[in-house]
């Protein structure tokens, strides 16, 4: 079986906040590929962020492998930006190809954007394999 056959998707629940915090910690500390946080938030900040998800996102889905959460995906409102986050053991081109295919088949949108850390090779390779083109580079400056 391929990766696609082993993944399932479900709506995010409040009971997912704990493993999502662990995932954020892994991405911030170990992988250093998170583009939306400069520091690890406190637990209450993390919960507040996810409780506001209905205002931020068109959809958020938990990705499961063998019935256990391994990551999540979201589509933002407005520009329909795709975000995919997963634990390091799933950070492969094959995983991202399966998730991108799921989104393209189920979202009903004509166009999707994806904001990606330029060091996130597996996701970039999967996006390119599915015909996504680079349309901008974003830079952040601080005082």
Image: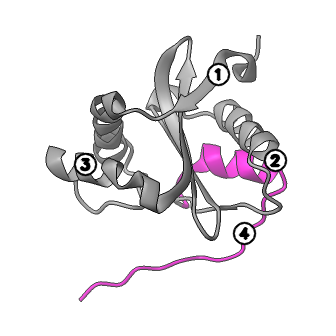
From the top left corner, tell me how far across and down residue 39 is, in percent: 23, 58
Q: Residues within 10 Å of mark 3 (few under 14, many from 20)?
A: some
Q: Secondary structure at mark 1?
A: strand
Residue linked to disc 1: 7
Out of 64 and 37, give the one closest to the viewer. 64
Q: Earlier in the sequence, mark 3 or mark 4?
A: 3
Q: Secondary structure at mark 3?
A: helix
**From the viewer's perspective, is residue 142 above or below residue 7?**
below
From the top left corner, tell me how far across and down residue 26 is, in percent: 33, 38
How far apart are the two marked residues, 3 and 1, measured between alpha carbons? 26 Å
Q: Are marks 3 and 1 in contact (CB under 8 Å)?
A: no
Residue linked to disc 4: 134
Which of the two discs, 1 and 2, sits closer to the camera?
1
As drawn, is 9 to the left or to the right of 134?
Answer: left
The residue range painted magenta reads 118-143
Residue linked to disc 2: 129
Q: Earlier in the sequence, mark 1 or mark 2?
A: 1
**From the viewer's perspective, is residue 65 above or below residue 14?**
above
How far apart are the two marked residues, 1 and 2, measured between alpha carbons? 19 Å
Out of 4 and 134, give the one closest to the viewer. 4
Q: Residue at x 77, y 10 (%)?
A: 1
From the top left corner, tell me how far across and down residue 62 is, in percent: 51, 32
Q: Is residue 121 magenta?
A: yes
Q: Residues within 10 Å of mark 4 (few under 14, many from 20)?
A: few
| Quadrant in the picture for residue 49 | bottom left
How far apart are the two marked residues, 1 and 4, measured between alpha carbons? 27 Å
């Amino acid at each position: 079986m391929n990766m696609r056959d082993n993944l399932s998707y479900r709506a995010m629940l409040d009971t997912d906040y704990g493993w999502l915090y662990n995932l954020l910690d892994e991405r911030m500390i170990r992988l250093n590929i998170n583009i939306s946080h400069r520091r690890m938030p406190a637990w209450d900040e993390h919960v507040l962020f996810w409780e506001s998800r209905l205002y931020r996102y068109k959809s958020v889905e938990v990705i499961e492998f063998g019935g256990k959460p391994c990551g999540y995906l979201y589509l933002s409102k407005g520009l329909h930006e795709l975000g995919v986050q997963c634990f390091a053991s799933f950070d492969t081109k094959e995983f991202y190809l399966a998730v991108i295919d799921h989104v393209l088949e189920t979202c009903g949108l004509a166009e999707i954007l994806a904001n990606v850390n330029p060091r996130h090779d597996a996701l970039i390779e999967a996006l390119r394999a599915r015909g996504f083109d680079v349309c901008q580079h974003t830079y952040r400056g601080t005082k």
